[in-house]
Amino acid sequence: MNTDPNTVRDLFASHYFVFAFLASLGTLQIAVSNSGIRGLWLTPHREMTRWLGVALIVTGIVVFFLQPMWVEGPWAAGSVQADSVTREIGIASWGELAGARNVNDIHGGLDGNKQAMWFPLGAILAFVVSALIGAVNVKTLRSLESSDENDSPTAAQTDDGLAGLVNRSIFANLPASFRNFKSDIAGVWRSGIESADHWSLFKMIFGRSSS
């Protein structure tokens, strides 16, 4: 290939990161709209959030695979062969689009290790964006529903964890979740150790497990 592999790798990484971000954001929106976790919605409405999630996934896929048609890279028309050594920098043709992204990692393509780094970063950014916009949506929804609420907290308003995100933003939900985590972790850890010890292979072999 007549170009620096590091340049190609940077190009691939940026494209893959955007793809991972959009796909993760769309998947998250479909999941939280189905479960009613309004603290992570990108819109104030369930159906709109769900369809936005579908649109984000489709957009991520389409943009990632069609980008070579308008972004210069190692897929110039006429140079896309089975061996990525022959690649030239340029715009891909429609007929060669299917193989445009098929670049060996030694020539700048992304190997599994790089993908394992960029995909989680895209997913984390998707969650952060959902949390920030979700906080605004929750505030908007609660202001619209304030006329129907009384001053005393309901059970839904005092929930924590994922249940708390149904009616609160992640920022309002974190303190209660963290307090419950600190109070429960010792018991969970202790019961987990006891359960693991009960099923100890050595105890089962030597017949000393409790009945």
Image: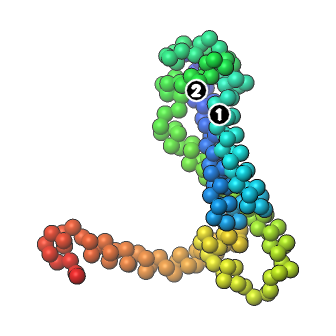
Helix, strand or loop under label 2: loop
In the rendering, at what x and y percent does residue 20 appear?
61, 43
Quarter of the picture containing the N terminus is: top right
**Residue at 50% of width from left, 17% of height from top?**
82
Residue closest to the eye, 108 or 24: 24
Asked whether the viewer can see residue 90, the reply is yes
Q: Quadrant of residue 80?
A: top right
Q: Say if mark 2 contacts mark 1, CB within 8 Å.
A: yes
Q: Position of 182 compared to 148: left or right? A: left
Among all residues in the image, which is located at the extreme front?
Answer: 47
Label 2 neighbour load within 10 Å: few <14, some 14-19, many 20+: many
Image: 204 above or below 34:
below
Q: Which mark is residue 64?
A: 1
In this picture, is 44 found above or below 61? Answer: below
| Cα gap from disc 2 to disc 1, whole angstroms | 9 Å
Residue at image x 37%, y 74%? 192
Q: Is residue 169 left or right of residue 113?
A: right
Relative horizontal placement of residue 143, taking residue 161 as reference (left or right): right
Q: How is the image coloured?
A: rainbow
- The location of residue 91, given as percent across then percent down, is 69, 19
> What mark, if any, has residue 39 been given in the picture?
none
The location of residue 139, given as percent across then percent down, is 80, 69
Determine crowd level at label 1: few under 14, some 14-19, many 20+ residues with C-alpha closer than 10 A.
Answer: some
Residue 101, disc: 2
Q: Is residue 132 visible?
A: no
Instruction: Give the tally of numbered discs.
Output: 2
| The furthest residue to the bottom | 152
| Label 1 element class | helix
- Residue at left offset 67%, top offset 55%: 29
